[in-house]
Structures are given as C-alpha cells and as structure tokens.
Amino acid sequence: MYKTKLAKTLLTDTDSYAILDAASSDAVYSKALFEHERFEVLFDEEELETVSPYLVKLEKDDEVTEWILKNYEGADWMSFVQSSKPYDELLEILKEFTKMYDEEEQHDVYIRYWDPRALEVCLDIFGEEKTKWFESIDVMYARDTLEENVLLKFTPKGKESMVLNEEAGV
C-alpha cells in the first residue's frame, strides 16, 4: 500500500470512501463492472450507470484502494469523504444530494458535488441544506484544481488546504 500523505489522511480509523465519476473517466465504469460488489452507483436511474458517480469504501492493503490512490494525481473524476455514520446512512445522503429541484426551471438538476472542479460551488448551492450534508459527512476531500499537489479539506467549519508530497505528487 502507498505510504503517501494522501493514503495516511484517508486510511484512518474513520471510514473513508472515494466517489468516482464514470462520466469523466471510462476507467471508472470498467472497474465498476469488474469490481461490482465494491462499487455502489449513486444515481437511481439504471440507464445512467455508465455516467454515474460511484461510491467505493477504501480499505488498507486493498487492490481497489491502491488503484484509486495510484490514479489520484491530476484526476478530476474523484473526491473523497470520511464519515463515522453507518454506510447506508452515508449512501442515502450522497444519493439525495445528486439532484436538487430548480424552482425557476421547474425540474430536477444534477449537482456534481463529487467533481473537484465543482465541489466548492456545490457546497454553496446547498445553502441551509449544507448542515444536513455535514451531519453525515465528517470531511470531504478533493484535489485543488488551481494548485498542484494540494488537497482541499471541507468540513462544517470551512475549507483548509493540505500540501501533499511535493516530489511524488501524492
């Protein structure tokens, strides 16, 4: 297993999960087909499985976790959450927040909170619902899309930046 700062941050006593975006990476859906028992689709619509985000529990000394951590650097198709809540409760909140009702347009719209390029904006869009979000999620991590080797950490208190291994990237 990788002994990187990213791995040490994620592989703790608190359950950690990756959210992987099949819409942004063909490798995600391929891996989901192969490792189907580990990949939980977040969209309810079956016809969207090929472009859905997937939730994957991270485990120490695990091939899937190793694949995720190896592919982290520069990937706009993954983010991470840590939660002390039961898996089913976390899954429910993540699924719930994939869509929000647009009052102006009078229909549901997808909210791509798992995309590092959109995460901060999405958290702002959640407004008062952000409290509900952070009742199930202790921490959310995503790579900083503006600074190389920086991991952003989002908590109910706000955002922090963590510099990862400057030589190896992660």
Image (cartoon, rainbow, N blue to C red):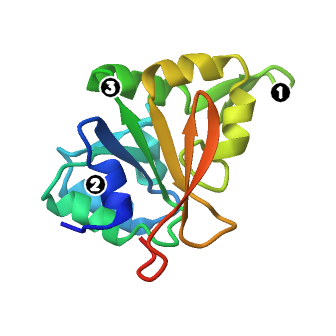
Q: Which mark is residue 84?
A: 3
Counting residues from the start of the chain, the first of labels 1 and 2 encountered is 2
Element marked by disc 3: loop
- Image check: 30 left or right of 144? left
Q: Position of residue 48 (x, y in %)?
A: 47, 45
Query: Relative to 92, does residue 170 appear above or below in the rendering?
Result: below
The quarter of the image holding the C terminus is bottom left
Crowdedness of circle 1 by 10 Å Cα count: few (<14), some, many (20+)? Answer: few
Query: Relative to 71, does residue 28 appear above or below in the rendering?
Result: above
Q: Residue furthest left?
A: 61
Identify residue for label 1.
Answer: 105
Disc 1 marks a residue whose amino acid type is Glu
- Image check: 130 left or right of 52? right
Q: Are marks 1 and 2 in contact (CB under 8 Å)?
A: no
Q: Residue furthest bottom?
A: 167
Q: Position of residue 47 (x, y in %)?
A: 44, 43
Disc 2 marks a residue whose amino acid type is Ala
The answer to whether residue 163 is seen in the rendering is: yes
Element marked by disc 2: helix
The quarter of the image holding the N terminus is bottom left
Per the model, the C-alpha gap separating discs 1 and 2 is 33 Å
Identify residue for label 2.
Answer: 32
Residue at position x 24%, y 58% from top? 65
Counting residues from the start of the chain, the first of labels 3 and 1 encountered is 3
Q: Position of residue 145 (x, y in %)?
A: 65, 64
Q: Residue 67, located in which quarter of the rendered image? A: bottom left
